[in-house]
Image (tube, helix red, strand yellow):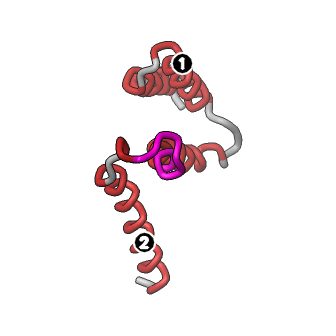
Amino acid sequence: MRLELFLMALAVGVATYAFRVLPTRMARRDLPEGGMLARFLASTGPAAIATLFTASVLPLVQQAGLPVPLVVGTLAVVAVFVWRRSVVLATLAGAGVYGGIFGLLGA
């Protein structure tokens, strides 16, 4: 393994660990509401979800066009989240719709 690759993996691992541990170790209730650190800690969850979504969708989007199951599944996630404000229901709906469309189209 090349040293550069190892160092990059190590740096990413340390940063990921810090993002997961720091918010649980720092008591957010002790921080001033609306302060920079409180806003930063509150935004790490959505930022992680957006990063994972982008990383998993990017290879699909780089193909010839947007796959229909991906578009419809994403729309289902957004619609159910707006309707119910539940991440769990939105995720289940998106996965179900994506799988259903994928199965129907035989993609």
Numbered circle sitting on residue 103: none
Asked whether, in this view, residue 35 is left or right of residue 25, the answer is right
Residue at screen point 39% across, 74% down: 10
Q: Which of 17 and 73 is in front in this view?
A: 17
Tell me the kind of residue under disc 2.
Ala
In this orientation, does residue 79 appear?
Answer: yes
Select label 1 or label 2 by which is in front: 1
Provide the secondary structure element on which disc 1 rests: helix
Foreground of the two, 49 or 65: 49
- Asked whether, in this view, residue 26 is left or right of residue 106, the answer is left
View extreme (top): residue: 83
- Identified at 41% across, 21% down, the residue is 86
Mark identifier at residue 9: 2
Residue occupied by mark 1:
82
The answer to whether residue 96 is above or below residue 83 is below
Instruction: Tell me if residue 53 is in the magenta stretch.
Output: no
Q: Is residue 86 left or right of residue 105?
A: left
State the image coordinates of residue 55 (x, y, percent, origin top left).
53, 50
- Dividing the image into 4 quarters, which one contains the N terminus? bottom left
Q: Residue at image x 64%, y 44%?
A: 61
Q: Position of residue 90 (x, y in %)?
A: 45, 23
Quadrant into which the C terminus falls: top right
Q: Earlier in the sequence, mark 1 or mark 2?
A: 2
Residue 56 x, y percent position in the rendering: 51, 46
Which residue is rendered at x = 49% and y = 26% of the image? 98
Residues shaded magenta: 31-40
